[in-house]
Image: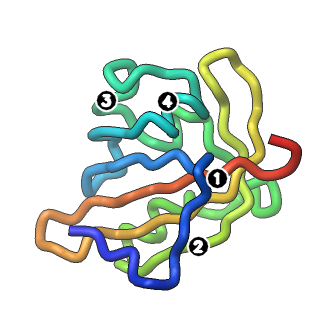
Amino acid sequence: MFELLDDYFTSPLTGIFVCDQQGRILAFGKGAQEMCGFRELDLMGLDLAESLGLATPEEPDAQQPHKTALEWGARVLGKPMTLHTSSDMIVPVTGDFFPALDDDGGLLAAFTPRGGN
């Protein structure tokens, strides 16, 4: 169960991924597919950060934000990141991460394109 509360509003361009407690992709929506170019079956079961080539250019040595959210059980919002698409383009995005509030764990990750996208 994820709680986005009343203070989080996504853009129509936001891509949303659902991950398990280890950060592996379980599912994602149409917006995510349009952003990254991968089909859901191509990424299912793969690590979120590795499969999308996620990077935090402003904090290159920092732990991946989705791992921080899972470890601490707290939202991580507004992280400037880059994402690699299936066509090997690098897209600047803002990453928002929401840990699940139930015993199963898991994570919802939302990526919104930044800049002229």
Estimate how packed mark 2 is, as few (under 14), some (14 to 19) or many (20 or more) residues with alpha carbons within 10 Å. Answer: some
Query: Sequence-wise, which precedes: disc 3 or disc 2?
Result: 3
Q: Nearer the viewer, mark 1 or mark 2?
A: 1
Estimate how packed mark 1 is, as few (under 14), some (14 to 19) or many (20 or more) residues with alpha carbons within 10 Å. Answer: many
Query: Do the numbered discs 3 and 4 sit on residues whose CB atoms are within 8 Å?
Result: no
Q: Nearer the viewer, mark 3 or mark 1?
A: 1
Element assignment for label 2: strand
Q: Amino acid at mark 3?
A: Met
In the rendered image, residue 77, in percent from the top left (x then y), is placed at 59, 73
Q: Amino acid at mark 1?
A: Thr
Q: Which residue is mark 1?
A: 112
Q: Residue at x 71, y 48 (%)?
A: 113
Query: Sequence-wise, which precedes: disc 3 or disc 1?
Result: 3
Query: Do the numbered discs 3 and 2 sit on residues whose CB atoms are within 8 Å?
Result: no
Query: Sequence-wise, which precedes: disc 3 or disc 4?
Result: 4
Residue 101, image quadrant: bottom left
Q: Residue at x 45, y 42 (%)?
A: 48
Residue with the most extreme left position: 103
Query: Sequence-wise, which precedes: disc 1 or disc 4?
Result: 4
Q: Which residue is mark 2?
A: 77
Q: CA distance from mark 1 to mark 2?
A: 11 Å
In the rendered image, residue 72, in percent from the top left (x then y), is placed at 39, 79
Residue 92, image quadrant: top right
Q: Which residue is mark 4?
A: 33
User: How many callouts does the rendering have?
Assistant: 4
Q: Which residue is mark 3?
A: 44
Horizontally, residue 38 falls left or right of residue 25, namely: right
